[in-house]
Amino acid sequence: MFGILALGVFITFRCLDFPDLTVDGSYPLGAAVFAVMIYHGFGAGWAMLAAFLAGALAGAFTGFLHTFSRIPALLSGILTMTCLYSINLRIMGRPNISLSENLGHRTIFVILRDWFPEVPEAYLRLAFLLVLIVGIKLLLDFFLGTEIGLSIRATGDNETLVESQGVNPDSMKLIGVSVSNALVAFSGAMFAQHQGFVDVNMGIGMVVSGLASVIVGEVLMRGKTIFVMTLQVIVGSIVYRLATAVALNWGYNIGFKPYDLKLFTGLIVIIILSYPAVQERFSRRARTKQNG
Amino acid sequence: MDNRENKVMLQLENVNKYFFRYTQDEQWAVRNLNLKISEGQFVTVVGSNGAGKTTLLNLISGSYLPDSGKIMINGEDVTNLPAYRRAPYIGRVFQNTFQGTAPSLTIEENLSLAYLKGKRKGLRPAINDEVKKFFQEKLADVGLGLEKRLRERVGLLSGGQRQALALVMATFGHPKILLLDEHTANLDPKTGEKIMELTNKLIEENTLTALMVTHNLQSALSFGDRTLMMDEGEIVLDLVGEERKKMTIEELLERFSELRHKKFTEDRALLSS
């Protein structure tokens, strides 16, 4: 589930080199749109599709701010995220919504349970999510290998080149950020179904945890092909989630509270990102010592 | 001369380009420039630093838009087309060996990008066996063994190899005009020579129209069939035919100081002469 989110973050951060903070807003957006669609009697499939599209729209807005209005990428994301906070509240009508079978809300998990009544629900959820993430990974691998996908990756790598090859880098950014946020919103919708509720604040810190997953994956596995890179992201997000679950359990015993989690996520990302610079500084100091 | 040479491929009419216009730092980088290049001509451009050579290329490629004047490629007015819209007509290789390729993509992905130039992009896989074979043939012609390394990332190649790849990419799809911006300047002399040979070969084989900026006066005179000398945003010397054949570097420098009443200041050019 978070793997999907991490794949979205991967597109912007790694392929497009576009630090996109829209994620914190598009994640609850997906959940909100999903919940409201369900409340209005649409099926789970339609609701998830709507969430996906809403995310794409949010991404396109950020992309538009950046490419048309020439607002820096970070600020574009923050602006969209801020706007989305109000929009999400508008969509939901109140700060949180619960999804309950008793109210006739048939989430994808309820539907699945009815299809396979003999399988225990926990396993069913796990199996479904695994199939889903592998499917999305393969689709994304395919997409990034297509003509458009290739142009998107090249845009993050060398914009001048892309331009001289007759591709408008702005369109590629727009597409990339849209696809990314569509995935993020989709993952928000999945999470809403898993948890059975939607909260307007559920998106806080999602960019950082997505980024943490991407980075953890890169540390754990080597390889630069698209197939391996998306796999890294998924493995990274699973390891990251396991680590936070363990940390929450263990941390509770030594006096940390769940609300400390985001602090630690942030710290982990900071440590990993600073590592190369710190290492360089130390090795330089060691060298000067040797020479002196 | 065959009659192909009569068709004008590139034409600049009274082109002006200012930098920092209407400020104290205003620079008149290209001044009332007129230039006609016929199809199949290989033009070399020399000039001191700040003479406007690179600005000229940027104006042709659309990286800069002119403040006034008109630019036509193959009879079509492209003056106000953004770079990516003009790209199908233009192949370009840069001085910086990282600029002509995408370093974190593989060789085949880079080639594919160039191969798709000017075509509508869709959701088809960018690489298939057919184009792969085509790429291998093209790279085999270059003779650097790159055809066996299609799946390697370009960032791992040497500067010379990257430049060779950039050249192959720039000549894909027979561009109307090939722009070379000191593309051998960042290479060691031996590699630079090889790339220059390759350049010449590709231009001749594909009968391309080319415009090459260079710091090396020797290669400016020995390659191509026309040489322009620029100074302060103007073309001060335009050499073709017999006059150009007899020209030596010394004479060229002399002509320059006669014309402009100053010395040709370019350390690199003097060193390489």
Image (cartoon, grey):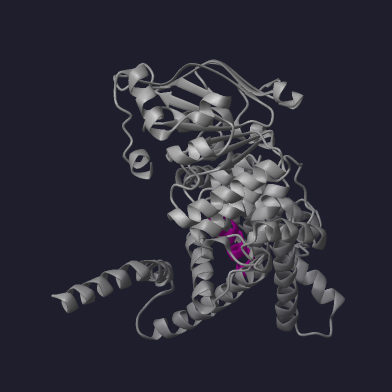
Closer to us: B179 or A249: B179
Report the side of B261 relative to A118 (left or right).
left
Report the side of A205 relative to A34 (left or right).
left
**Count of numbered marks:** 0
Residue most toward the right?
Answer: A115
Q: Main secondary structure of the magenta part?
A: helix
Which quadrant would the C terminus of chain B be assigned to in this image?
top left
Q: Is residue B27 above or below residue B265?
A: above
Give residue B148's quadrant in the image: bottom right
Closer to us: A250 or A91: A250
Report the side of A153 relative to A273 (left or right).
right
Closer to us: A139 or B149: B149
Which quadrant would the N terminus of chain B be assigned to in this image?
top right
Please provide percent x and percent y for residue B22: 36, 16
Residue at image point 84% right, 85% down: A118
Residue at image point 43% right, 71% down: A261
Residue at image point 50% right, 42% down: A76
Report the side of A136 relative to A158 (left or right).
right
Residue most toward the left?
Answer: A292
- The magenta span reads A1-14
Closer to us: B81 or B95: B95
Q: Is residue A142 above or below residue A91?
A: below
Please provide percent x and percent y for residue B15: 52, 17
Residue at image point 50% right, 45% down: B183
Q: Is residue B258 above or below residue B196?
A: above
Please provide percent x and percent y for residue B186: 43, 50
Q: Is residue A249 above or below residue B148?
A: below
Please provide percent x and percent y for residue A267: 37, 69
Q: Is residue B248 magenta?
A: no
